């Protein structure tokens, strides 16, 4: 298992330090964005047709994107208990809520002057509040990030943090409501920034302040080193945010011109960057989880020396197959395989050679199994167990002979003792039908009976001279 998987800082974008590849990719996205901006900026005032379906489509996509991004960031907050992540999640929830209000009040969309008592200045001011509020949240994120103490995800008390998440939703509703009221019922308190579909001179001052907020957020993120992957893509977001404001509120002259449409496309892309990276991160985390599960399975269910199943896996497999055969009424066979004179082999060749011998025998036995349901496990020491579901007595005996012959073939040239005996195995075979077992016996007693029968057959094979297969008599039904 790679070391990176075990490190907490590799688990989340907010804690994973940006590398050269991430920096180059982010720089390429910024360069492309600036190039497209340079191409469109001179034509920003070109008037285009009023395409009313663009607004609900664009803002619906924006709402969904911001909500999903906020949910993913809240998930990281719940794991790391980072205040900066909490604030950043709040930023995306704020933009989602403001987008909903902006769509409802847009003139000509749902009503001639918009819903919620909107006037001709409402959506323009909501746009300013929306695009000025998000960078302020990002500024708070950059400042809080320097003071954050990231908690261990394994020790996070999620039941204590959920109330904070619910409180976030309630608290955010307050500024959104106040800003909405300011742009509708209290609009007389604000200067006029729209004349029909055109901007007034006052718009320059307002949008200049909003643009400065985004620039400050970008600078604070840059100064907040070392940069995490999340910081890096937030900087890309702020660059796209600056271009959005420049095209749709500075260089253009009103609604439905090229700058109006292009700026909003940039805004949608800006909201998507972090989401796309978070989704990629989720895929990478899932792949790491699969790798971790595989590594854990190898640790817990495989014998580290021979690479075959260990005793734990055998016990679980035996119980599973016994219950399956009990339901179907089919027999279950068990082979106990022991390497003959293994102590002599160790004494003559050493423990390292003994380990090599165990591995070779295990590989030979594993290669001899014919069905995917057959299971080989190291039972203990130099003893192996072979589980043969739905195999009758004749099939089990033939498999025992096959295993013995396979080891004899692998052991050519090996000698297990001073007398020059080649490595060989003794095999005890037992076949039982679960439905033929006494009803009074418990499951554990029935399994113990099968193991005992195979053990007795194995000892009988050893008593008869080793290097042979002995089969226990088939248990007859007592019912």
Image (cartoon, helix red, strand yellow):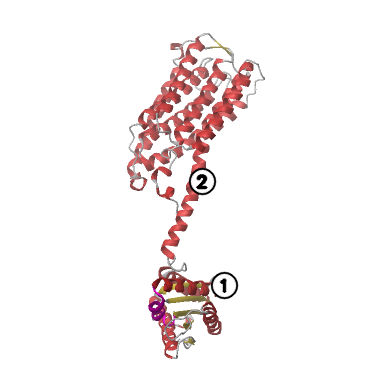
Residue 371 location (% of width, % of height): 57, 72
Secondary structure under the numbered disc 2 in the rendered image: helix
Query: Picture quarter containing residue 351?
Result: bottom left
Looking at the rendered image, the quarter that the N terminus falls into is bottom left
Reading the image, the residue beneath label 1 is 371
> Would you say residue 234 is visible in this rendering?
yes
In the image, farthest residue toward the right: 49
Inspect the magenta stretch and tell me whether residue 348 lies in it.
Answer: yes
Q: Which quarter of the figure is the C terminus placed in?
A: bottom left
The picture places residue 344, in percent across and down from the top left corner, at: 39, 81
Q: What is the span of residues highlighted in magenta in the rendered image?
A: 339-350
Q: Is residue 145 magenta?
A: no
**From the viewer's perspective, is residue 155 above or below residue 330?**
above
Indicate the position of residue 420 as horizontal and vertical percent values: 46, 85
Residue located 55% across and 75% down the image = 368
Q: Identify residue for label 2.
A: 283
Is 360 positioned to the left or the right of 172 in the image? right
Front residue of this view, candidates 281 and 332: 281
Place of residue 12 in the rendered image (x, y in percent of width and height, measured from the top left)? 43, 42
Separation of disc 1 and disc 2 at Cα?
34 Å
Looking at the image, which is closer to me, 344 or 474? 344
The residue sitting at 46% across, 31% down in the picture is: 92
Q: Quadrant of residue 250?
A: top right
Q: Is residue 113 above or below residue 65?
A: above
């Amino acid at each position: 298992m790679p070391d990176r998987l075990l490190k907490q800082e590799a688990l989340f974008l907010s804690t994973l330090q940006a590398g050269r590849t991430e920096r180059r990719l982010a720089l390429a996205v910024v360069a492309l964005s600036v190039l497209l901006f340079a191409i469109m900026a001179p034509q920003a005032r070109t008037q285009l047709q009023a395409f009313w379906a663009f607004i609900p489509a664009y803002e619906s996509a924006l709402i969904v994107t911001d909500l999903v991004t906020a949910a993913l960031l809240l998930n990281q907050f719940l794991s790391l208990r980072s205040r900066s992540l909490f604030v950043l999640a709040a930023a995306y929830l704020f933009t989602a809520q403001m987008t909903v209000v902006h769509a409802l009040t847009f003139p000509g969309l749902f009503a001639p002057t918009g819903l919620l008592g909107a006037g001709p200045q409402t959506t323009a001011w909501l746009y300013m509040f929306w695009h000025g509020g998000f960078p302020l949240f990002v500024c708070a994120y950059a400042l809080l990030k320097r003071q954050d103490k990231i908690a261990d995800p394994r020790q996070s008390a999620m039941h204590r943090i959920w109330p904070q998440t619910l409180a976030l939703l309630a608290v955010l509703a307050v500024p959104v409501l106040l800003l909405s009221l300011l742009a509708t019922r209290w609009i007389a308190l604000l200067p006029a920034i729209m004349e029909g579909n055109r901007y007034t001179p006052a718009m320059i001052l307002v949008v200049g302040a909003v643009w400065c907020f985004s620039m400050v957020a970008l600078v604070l993120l840059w100064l907040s080193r070392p940069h995490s992957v999340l910081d890096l893509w937030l900087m890309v977001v702020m660059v796209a945010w600056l271009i959005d404001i420049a095209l749709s509120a500075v260089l253009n002259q009103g609604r439905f011109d090229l700058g109006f449409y292009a700026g909003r496309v940039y805004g949608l892309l800006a909201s998507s960057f972090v989401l796309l990276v978070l989704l990629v991160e989720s895929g990478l985390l899932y792949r790491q989880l699969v790798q971790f599960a595989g590594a854990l399975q190898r640790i817990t269910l495989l014998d580290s020396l021979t690479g075959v199943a260990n005793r734990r896996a055998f016990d679980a497999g035996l119980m599973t197959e016994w219950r399956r055969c009990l339901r179907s009424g089919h027999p279950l066979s068990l082979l106990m395989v022991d390497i003959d004179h293994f102590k002599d082999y160790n004494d003559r060749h050493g423990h390292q050679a003994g380990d090599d011998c165990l591995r070779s025998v295990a590989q030979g036995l594993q290669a001899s199994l014919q069905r995917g349901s057959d299971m080989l496990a190291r039972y203990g020491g130099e003893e192996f167990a072979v589980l043969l579901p739905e195999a009758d007595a004749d099939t089990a005996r033939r498999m025992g002979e096959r295993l013995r012959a396979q080891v004899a073939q692998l052991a050519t040239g090996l000698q297990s003792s001073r007398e020059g005996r080649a490595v060989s195995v003794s095999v005890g075979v037992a076949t039982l039908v679960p439905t033929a077992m006494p009803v009074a016996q418990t499951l554990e007693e029935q399994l113990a009976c099968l193991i005992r029968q195979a053990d007795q057959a194995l000892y009988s094979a050893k008593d008869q001279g080793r290097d042979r297969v002995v089969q226990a008599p088939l248990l007859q039904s007592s019912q």
